Image (spheres, rainbow, N blue to C red):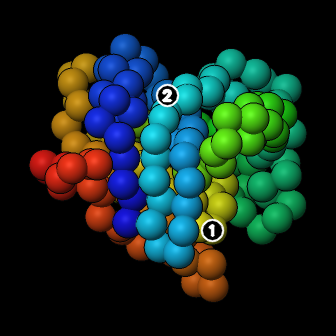
Amino acid sequence: MLRIAEQALEAIQKHAESGYPLEICGFLVGSASDDTRDAREAWPVRNAWEEDPEQRAQLVAGLEAAGGASADRWESADTERRFLVSPADTVAMMKRARQEGMDLIGLYHTHPNHPAIPSDFDRDAAWPDWSYLIVSVREGKVAEERSWVLEEEERQFQEEAITLYGGPVGQ
Ligand SMILES: [Zn+2]
């Protein structure tokens, strides 16, 4: 289950709508225990796919080497369906989280004009035990939010419930 603070969810929704029609992303920051991840804050991070061609080439090559989607497939995919977070940005955010007594517990990103269902690319780049919150944005407005966790053995996403501190998130 993903439990998320109301301000964090509102920040994600604002980020999602202001970034439209591009795909935006960020970290969920808080704490995790067993099957529950508590997202106290949401920290935007640049989408390396859009903003850093060199990182992008490296990341794609790395994912391909690890048995993920081929570079050709990445390059030919719909531009609205790709996001990548660079390892350097991840390490920097991880350090900042530790300094504030928290951990990175997941990632959020948008699917402009697509449902909040993970793509093959999302799966190839995903870590186990993190929450992947996907926000579908249609015509500049948030349409739905769904959260997913990667099952390590099958490497398939399993949907998880999203709860606000204080009550469930309406669909
Ligand atoms: Zn995605």
Under tag 2, what secondary structure? loop
- Going by the numbered disc 1, the residue's amino acid type is Pro
Who is closer to the viewer here, 70 or 149? Answer: 149
81 w.r.t. 13: above or below:
below
| Image mark for residue 158 | none
Packing grade of label 1 (10 A; few <14, some 14-19, many >=20) is some
Where is the N terminus found, in terms of image quarters? bottom left
Percent position (x, y) of residue 96? 73, 32
Q: Is residue 94 left or right of residue 124?
A: right
As measured in the structure, the alpha-carbon distance from the residue carrying label 1 to the one carrying label 2 is 21 Å
Q: Which residue is mark 2?
A: 24
Vertical placement of residue 122 versus 149, above or below: above
Residue, disc 1: 128
Mark 1 secondary-structure assignment: loop
Mark yes or no: residue 160 visible.
Answer: yes
**Within the image, what quadrant is residue 64 found in?**
bottom right
Residue at horizontal 55 percent and vertical 26 percent from the top: 44
75 on left or right of 165: right
**58 or 90: nearer the viewer:** 90
Q: Earlier in the sequence, mark 1 or mark 2?
A: 2
Amino acid tagged 2: Ile
Which sits in the foreground, 42 or 85? 42
* Residue at the bottom extreme of this rendering: 153
- Residue drawn at x 48%, y 35% is 41
